[in-house]
Amino acid sequence: SANSMWGGRFAAGPDAIMEAINASIGFDRRLYAQDIRGSRAHAAMLAATGIISDSDAEAIGKGLLTVLSEIEAGDFPFQTALEDIHMNVEARLKEVIGEPAGRLHTGRSRNDQVATDFRLWVRDQCDAAIEGLRALIRATVTQAEAGADWVMPGFTHLQTAQPVTWGHHMMAYAEMFGRDLSRFQDARARMNESPLGAAALAGTGYPIDRDMTAQALGFDRPMANSLDAVSDRDFALEFLSASAICAVHLSRLAEELVIWSSAQFRFVSMSDKWSTGSSIMPQKRNPDAAELIRAKIGRILGATVALFTVMKGLPLAYSKDMQEDKEQTFDAADTLMLALAAMTGMLSDLTANRDRLEAAAGIGFSTATDLADWLVRELGLPFRDAHHVTGSLVAMAEGRGVDLPDLTLEDMQSVHGQIRQDVFNVLGVHKSVASRQSYGGTAPDQVRAQIARWKEKLA
Ligand code: ARG
């Protein structure tokens, strides 16, 4: 039989496959709370403007709360034939309160309704991401504080570069996650306008009050253009883009944890809570959570690309294509929140191995730059010449299988006659990091200052 919501001009119901491709209730039921909240705001506004009676609005408002509790109790008869959450709720409202239910949809369309519901949902997800990132940054800062002056190798190309501190390395991620957090804040602020009242696309002839519904739903103002209001999903694209960037950061840290927890590195030990064993190899402690966080970017980026692709060629205003916005965004949001929580937990329970970090810090001639800088500072060599002299000394040390501080003064002088005993003062890894006092550098004082700035921001 024809659809009870729009079946007036239809003689027959849809083909079963038509129903299957068209229905979104399987996933958009997740918007029930937003849908009911939006409908209650709309009904209250219809009464305040005299478009419907107070008693009808009251019946609608109450009935919607009944429907809400039915859904929350898991006691709601979702019907695929009713396509989506909007029509499921309205149809049930009709069963609960009868005739007044038919007045709810006055001056409204499913187009502005879904845009409103989805915006409210994505806005909540921005808040959840912001909260999750705060917790993660806190965990990062705590790690940094524990080892603000612990030396470790700093890498470029994953080859020994210069010694850095554990605190410095951790705080690098605090900065990245801090920018992620501000991206979600920015996106939230931009999306916080109400599409409700745009109706199908052109606005409505009823004397509605869009400011009233905007305010009731916590939006800053109504969207300025009704065509735009029902047409765009840029708020979801922004959320997905911010999520994808955040997932890249999570993935890079996860990758480092995978490397660092290997027997060859042993820079960190993961707690039992965040490790798994092997059914065949008894020695195994696998960093599965880190590996999965590393992999989750695939889903989030996939969702981002999918929604960009859905949107890119759509003429204004609403097209049914846009129903494909939800599953992607739902999955990306769930994935991001899980990855944030897992990384926070893993990092909180992680032990950095100070001795291993320090032992590794000197491997691979990590203080060669300090030697070159000494030649510039103390002997007045041009940096390029100092670089060359140091390179010869590194080659000599490498030939003998020792590190730079293991060369003798005579060895040094055989390459450059003016080198003095005090050159050895700069060849230690602790001296090296302590000297990097430039703003944002790896010197423990700088790292502690950075930690202090973040603690103030998080307070
Ligand atoms: N389920 C639809 C969606 O998610 C709701 C809007 C339907 N509007 C329409 N004119 N068919 O996009």
Image (tube, grey):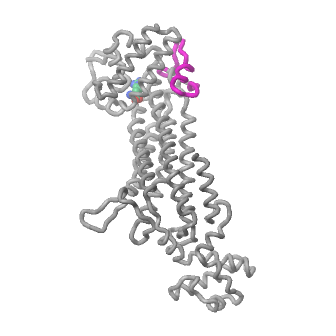
Q: Provide residue 218's location: percent of width, then percent of height.
A: 53, 27
Q: Quadrant of residue 67?
A: top left
Q: Provide residue 86's location: percent of width, then percent of height.
A: 38, 24
Q: Main secondary structure of the magenta part?
A: loop
Q: Is residue 168 above or below residue 114?
A: below
Q: Is residue 243 above or below residue 232?
A: below
User: Which residue is more in the foreground, 118 or 320?
Assistant: 118
Q: Is residue 101 above or below residue 331?
A: above
Q: Quadrant of residue 15?
A: top left
Does the stretch in magenta take in 374?
Answer: no
Does the stretch in magenta take in 211?
Answer: yes
Assign ligand 1 to one image quadrant. Answer: top left
* Point 43% across, 57% down: residue: 349
* Residue 386 horizontal side relative to residue 402, left or right: right
Q: Provide residue 5's location: percent of width, then percent of height.
A: 35, 17
Q: Which span is picked out in magenta?
A: 199-224
User: Which residue is more in the foreground, 28 or 358?
Assistant: 358
Instruction: Count the labels in the image.
Output: 0
Q: Quadrant of residue 174?
A: bottom right
* Point 64% across, 75% down: residue: 370
User: Which residue is more in the foreground, 18 or 83?
Assistant: 83
Q: Quadrant of the N terminus?
A: top left
